[in-house]
Amino acid sequence: MTVFLVIIVIALFAVTLWQMSKIFDLSKGSDIDSSQVATDKDNKTHGMFMLLFVILLYVITIYCFWNYSKFYLPEAASEHGSHVDNLMFLSIAIIMFVQIITQGLLHWFAYKYQGRKGRKALFYADNDKLEFIWTIIPVIVLAGLIIYGLFTWSDIMNINEEEDPMIVEIYAYQFAWRARYSGEDNTLGGANVRFIEGVNQLGVDESDPYGEDDVVTTELHLPVGKPVLFKFRSQDVLHSAFFPHFRAQMNVVPGMITQFGFTPTITSEEMRSSEYMVDKVANINEIRKDNSKDLMQAGEAPLDSYEFEYYLLCNKICGQAHYNMQMKIVVESEEDYKAWLEKQQTFGEAMAAQKESQLEVSTETAEVAVVEKENN
Ligand SMILES: [Cu+2]
């Protein structure tokens, strides 16, 4: 790839030099080679190419929208998600509208006003009215978009504490995620990477009573319809917590706590059975089936069939296994969520279990030592 790019750069540089030498020749004066000057026929051909080019541009645009729209994310699975989608849609609609008109006009004018023998360009210095119009329209449109965007942003980012959101910590490290639930008190115990030892993988402060009932898990379960406030912490480098289906993303920065809140609105099961997802999954499994045939012919194991799950992904290139840094998210009913949480071990229990097993080990070692001494 690098070699290919280098060759292109050298070729373009050579073309530039060649064109520049032609310009120098032209500027020398009367004894120029007239075969180098564009004739009416040349201008007509170039004008036609301009038109063809803009038509091709439109055709490619339409083809891309038609062929690749299946890669759009499904309906947003969070309350604020539709605001993000609307903002995105409005921006794309305005950009497409403006670009289709301006590109069309630009290329049409190049064709219509092509050079012709005897035709002279009109000298037109300025026009205040025109300049005013083409300045004020973008100003109004951009100001509208920015103000709309700012309102949407503050709507999404300002978490309403009165709604009593559930506090969950998302902990990132090379190369996985952990979730820490704040327990009955809805308050996370203090934590610091310096406290990391043994089963205390997240460095929860053992002396902080709030940490006792915290629950550390490898999957993120969320009750549907309940606002959640995520507190992000990183153990090592910069990560980014990306929840594509919920239209949420937040940087996870070592040494500080960042936060983001949203309310999930569609359970994993509902999303799985939606028309969009049924089609998509069927399509993926069709591809997997085809690929499995090749694999089986080569004597390898076939691929598992795919089932949809929400995922939390890392969206900052944070190291070698960054691509695989993910955590399954399950959005479920309040009862299912509570039943799941009930089964998890609290931080207090995990620490007690660790101490007990350490105690057992040390008693055993002591017993062995006594036996050995007696034998001697
Ligand atoms: Cu990462």
Image: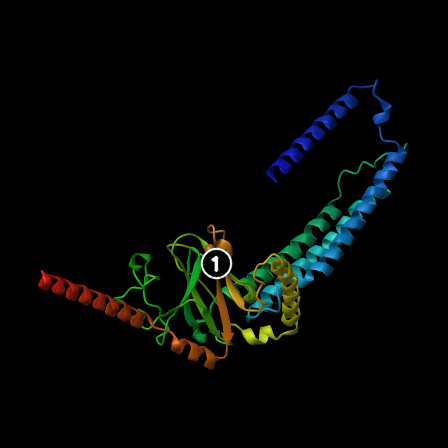
Q: How many marks?
A: 1
Residue drawn at x 41%, y 64% as measured from the top left: 178
- Which element carries disc 1, helix, strand or loop? loop
Question: What scheme was used to colour the molecule?
Answer: rainbow
Name the outermost residue toward the front. 375
Vertical order, 38 against 204 (above or below): above
- Is residue 135 visible in this depiction of the protein? yes
Q: Position of residue 58 (x, y in %)?
A: 77, 53
Beta carbon at label 1 within 8 Å of ligand 1: yes
Quadrant into which the C terminus falls: bottom left
Depth check, front residue: 156 or 58:
58
Residue 108 in view in this figure: no
Query: Who is closer to the viewer here, 72 or 371?
Result: 371
Q: Is residue 42 left or right of residue 375?
A: right
139 over 206 or under it: above or below? above
Indicate the position of residue 225 as horizontal and vertical percent values: 51, 76
Q: Residue at x 79, y 46 (%)?
A: 53
The residue tagged 1 is: 325
**Of 140 and 128, the residue lying toward us:** 140
Q: Is residue 350 left or right of residue 174?
A: left
x and y, in percent, of residue 117 in the image? 90, 32
